Image (tube, rainbow, N blue to C red):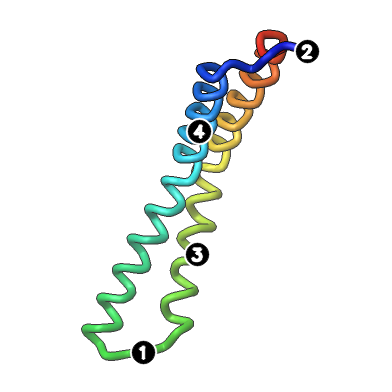
Amino acid sequence: MGDLGGDMALSMTSDMLWTAIKLAAPLIGVTTLVGLLVSILQTVTQIQESSLSFVPKLIAAAVVLLVLGGWMLSVLSEYAIRLIGNIPNYV
């Protein structure tokens, strides 16, 4: 068995974290923005309904996943192909 060097392990970890950030950023960004807008609307209108903040964020998350789902899947597939393709280099 080969030894996975520190540089290679650090490179793999960095690549994994950047891929996770690329995948999660659009979803988190849009739901945070929608939550902020709903909170501002609730403050201005003084409506404090808990479902009013949850439902728009859920709808926004579903729209982001429908619109960007193909791109997210291709990024994840590219990462997996690259990782599996490099297995001979790891051992």
Disc 2 + disc 1, Cβ < 8 Å: no
Whichever of labels 3 and 4 marks the residue nearer the N terminus, that label is 4
| Along the viewing direction, whichever of 16 and 63 lies nearer the viewer | 16
Whichever of labels 2 and 1 marks the residue nearer the N terminus, that label is 2
Q: Horizontally, is 20 left or right of 46 in the view?
A: right
Q: Horizontally, is 20 left or right of 76 in the view?
A: left
Across and down, in percent, residue 29 comes to 38, 53
Marks 1/3: CA distance? 19 Å
Residue 39 image-quadrant placement: bottom left
Quarter of the rendering occupied by the N terminus? top right
For the point 29% across and 69% down, the residue is: 37
| Secondary element type, mark 4 | helix
Q: Nearer the viewer, mark 2 or mark 1?
A: 2
**Which residue in the structure is indicated by mark 2?**
1
The amino acid pointed to by label 1 is Gln
| Number of marks in the rendered image | 4
Disc 1 + disc 4, Cβ < 8 Å: no
**Which residue in the structure is indicated by mark 4?**
19
The amino acid pointed to by label 4 is Thr
Q: Nearer the viewer, mark 3 or mark 4?
A: 4
Disc marking residue 59: 3
| Along the viewing direction, whichever of 73 and 3 lies nearer the viewer | 3
Marks 1/4: CA distance? 37 Å
The amino acid pointed to by label 3 is Ile
Whichever of labels 2 and 3 marks the residue nearer the N terminus, that label is 2
Across and down, in percent, residue 69 comes to 56, 42
Residue 79 image-quadrant placement: top right
Q: Is the residue 23 above or below the residue 61 in the image?
A: above
Disc marking residue 48: 1
